[in-house]
Image (cartoon, rainbow, N blue to C red):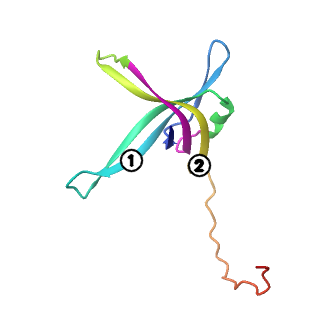
Amino acid sequence: MEMTARLTGDAKISTLKNDRQVVNFSVAINDSYKAKGSNEPTKVVTYVQCDYWVNPGVAQYLTKGTLVELQGRVGVNAYIGKDGEAKATLTFHVNTIKLHGKAGTKDEAPVKENTGAIVEPADDLPF
């Protein structure tokens, strides 16, 4: 399965007893639809807990707000909450990660606009 989503927080690396490392992170999938007979779109956000076992070095690039494309398989974790009610979380066991964009930060320098004059192309272009 494939999904494209944004990270809801920075990824964390966990080390298990046998020194294997796993990268854990959460993503939000945004969607919208128009209900029958309505002109107003309804927005839906689905949160998915992800784990990635292949390369823990990728965790440094998985920061809050980053747009990622993930491939893997879906799972569900069911449990009984503290209130005694049955609950479930959607999980995604990631095999492949593609980074599509880094979230902007306040520390980044603003992009400078090109205020130069428009120049006509040269007549001696090779095409």
**Looking at the picture, how far across and down is residue 81, in whole percent?**
34, 18
* Magenta-colored stretch includes residue 72: yes
The dot on residue 109 is none
- From this view, report whether residue 121 is shown above or below residue 65: below
Q: Are marks 2 and 1 in contact (CB under 8 Å)?
A: no
Up/down of 54 relative to 33, above or below:
above
Circle 2: residue type: His
Residue 77 lies in the magenta-colored region: yes
Check disc 2 and report the residue beneath it. Answer: 100
Quadrant location of the C terminus in the rendered image: bottom right
Magenta part of the chain: 62-78
Mark 2 surroundings within 10 Å by alpha-carbon count, few (fewer than 14), some (14 through 19), many (20 or more): few
Disc assigned to residue 31: 1
Q: Residue at horizontal 66%, vertical 13%?
A: 18
Q: Residue at x 61, y 25 (%)?
A: 22
How packed is label 1: few (under 14 Cα within 10 Å), some, or many (20 or more)? few
